[in-house]
Structures are given as C-alpha cells and as structure tokens.
Amino acid sequence: MISSTFFFLFSQLGVGMMLTLLFISPRSIGNSFFKFASLTAAILLGVTLGFNFLFPSPVRQSQLPVAFLLVSAGLTLIYNRAVDLDKFAGAFVLLTGATAAGLVAIATDSLAFNHLLPLGGWENWMLLINHLAATALLGSVMLTMVFGHWYLVIPRLSIDPLKRLTKVLIAAITIRIVTMAASFAVLHFKQAVPFSAVLRELLIQQGIFFWPRVIFGVLAPIVLAGMIWNTVKIHHTQAATGLLYLAVVALLFGEFFSKFLLFAVRIPI
C-alpha cells in the first residue's frame, strides 16, 4: 500500500505542476520561475521513480506507467535546460510532451490497478478520472503557492498570472469534487454491493479516514479558494500565499486519505 500511495501522490504532484505551467507563459513572467518549477517537478518525478525501483507496487499489472513517467521526467529535465536558454518555442513543445507523457503514465497506472471493487467494468475508469482530477488539483495548488512567492523576487510582477492560476485551482477543486460524486453515483447505480453497506463502511467503520478526507479534501479547499480569490482581487499577494500554504497542506492530507480509502474500501473517492 505504501509504495502505491507514494507513487500515486508524488507522480500526480510532479505531473500536475507541469500541467499547470501550460496556463502561463515565460515570455510575460521571465524564465526563472519556470526553471525552478520544472526542476522541482523533475525532482519529484525522480524520487517517485527511485522509490518505485526500491519498492515496486504489488497491485500494478504493468510497468508501462513507470516507463511513461521516466519519459516525462527526462523531457522535464530537457525542458528545464531549454527554458533556461530562452528557447521558448522549443520549450513549450517539450513542456507539452512532458505533460502528455506524465498524464499517460497516470492513466495507465490507474487502468493497471487491480485492487478495486467491481463496478460493472467501470471501476478502473472511475479511478482514472479521479486520478487525473487529483493530478490537476495537486499540481495547481502547489504551483500557485510557489508562484505567490515570486512577488517577493519580482515585486512589480503583474497580478494577472496569479489570478489565472487561482482560477485554474478553483476549476481543479470543482472537477475533483465532481469526480468524487461520480464515483458514488456509479457505485449506487451499478450496485456491486448494497449502497447502504458501502456508506456504513465509509461513514462509521472507516470514519476516522473518511471524514478527514471530506474536511481536508472538500470543505477546507472550498473555503480557502474563496478567501484566496478575494485576496488576489485586492492584490494582497502575501496573504494569498499564506492561504495557499494552508490549501497545499489541506489538499495533500485530503488526497492521502483518498489513497488510504482506495485500499481500505477499494473505491476511488
């Protein structure tokens, strides 16, 4: 369980950061932030691959996800060098390739996962959409938080990129909540097991993990997203960055509990 949880969280975090970089441009911000962010993502992917080499996942039917993640990590490193040389057109192609390879790695890892409750053939597809949504969520909150610090490096930096990243984060939170609801909907209509039995398992027997999942992964992000947006609108970047710190912690906890419940009840939520 630990090896798979580590692979899920860190690969989604690294790939998600690269995905979120697609929404802003180094031409308007400068290349320093992109160098730092891509290096951070490459380190996260490298650590994930190293941990997987030492502790392979016992619930993965294929090594294809690892191969795609290795490609993504390699392209991320090349992107880091290209953006450092101000080769922005080529760097964008590399960024797109690194992101695509990373998303394929996460998708194939979800489809290869073999520890799921049967849902009429939908179980792996539900895991896929939940993991892709988690990738966008973790990457956007981490990158937005890091970008908030860039106003200390470049005080006259336009507020527009932070506004755009905040909108991306809000969209990612919304999509993640929708995918959770979709999992419950499929579970209800497919009825592989009685829906009431699943709810009893989640709310009572696994309540010590389910309720923190809801609090940290749903309720807290909704409240924090509203507060972050309001501070960004008044150009209070330091307050926004502090709130983004809280959002990073909350969402990491939320996604950790999500992965734990995946193994405990075999349902992606």
Image (cartoon, rainbow, N blue to C red):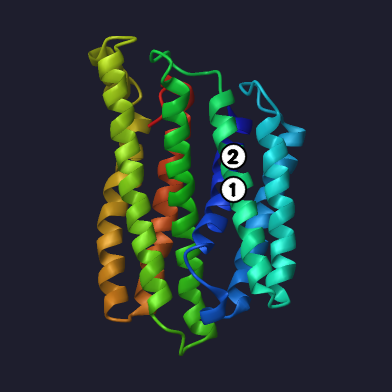
Residue at left offset 25%, top offset 71%: 230
Residue hosting label 1:
100
At label 2, the amino acid type is Val
Name the foreground residue: 150 vs 25: 25
| Above or below, comparing residue 267 to residue 29 in the picture | above
| Above or below, comparing residue 18 to residue 6 in the picture | below
Q: Give the image location of residue 62, x and y in percent.
A: 67, 24
Mark 2: secondary structure: helix
Q: Quadrant of residue 7?
A: top right
At label 1, the amino acid type is Ala
Residue 104 got which mark? 2
Q: Quadrant of the N terminus?
A: top right
Q: Give the image location of residue 184, x and y in percent.
A: 29, 26
Q: Give the image location of residue 235, x and y in percent.
A: 32, 81
Name the foreground residue: 242 vs 190: 190
Left or right of 160 in this view: 218: left
User: Residues at badges 1 and 2 in contact (C-beta under 8 Å)?
Assistant: yes
Residue at left offset 73%, top offset 59%: 77
Q: Quadrant of residue 119?
A: top left
